[in-house]
Amino acid sequence: MKEESYSTYQAKAQLSKLLRQVRNNKKIVITHHGRPVARLVPFEEEEQDLEQRLRQLTETGIIEAGADDVDARFAPLGRSPGALDRFLAERD
């Protein structure tokens, strides 16, 4: 299905019409100076689990898959004794 495209000016002027189209399962692209900036799509009531949502975001290019070794990326930082005291002293 080809998506219809409207400029931001057109979308503001015809919002009710666009919402009726979306309610009828049409997808609308909003452009700004000819470049796509948003997409109006029908609201989906079904909830996705985390794995499905991550897969969807990866497929659309919004996020990228990271390294498999999560523990190595999120290793705890070492604590420096008295760091808060030094910070407060430098702040004054």
Image (cartoon, rainbow, N blue to C red):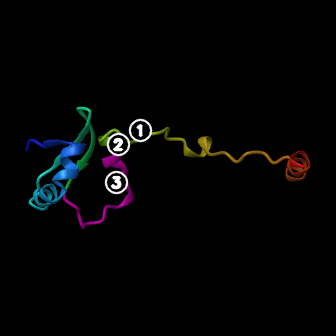
Q: Residues within 10 Å of mark 3 (few under 14, many from 20)?
A: few
Percent position of residue 16, x then y: 16, 60
Q: Which residue is labeled 1 in the image?
A: 64
Q: Is residue 78 left or right of residue 88?
A: left
Q: Residues within 10 Å of mark 1 (few under 14, many from 20)?
A: few
**Amino acid residing under circle 3:** Arg
Residue 2 or residue 48, whichever sits in front:
2
Residue 73 or residue 14, whichever sits in front:
14
How many marks are shown on the rendered structure?
Answer: 3
Would you say residue 86 sits in the magenta stretch? no
**Stretch in magenta:** 42-57
Q: Are the two marked residues, 1 and 2, in contact with CB atoms closer than 8 angstroms?
A: yes
- What mark, if any, has residue 58 been given in the picture? 2
In 3D space, how far apart are the residues under numbered discs 3 and 2 (Cα atoms)? 9 Å
Q: Are the two marked residues, 3 and 2, in contact with CB atoms closer than 8 angstroms?
A: no
Q: Within the image, what quadrant is residue 63 found in? A: top left
Percent position of residue 81, x then y: 89, 50
Residue 77 or residue 8, whichever sits in front:
8
Q: Which residue is labeled 3 in the image?
A: 53
Residue most toward the top? 34
Residue 89 or residue 31, whichever sits in front:
31
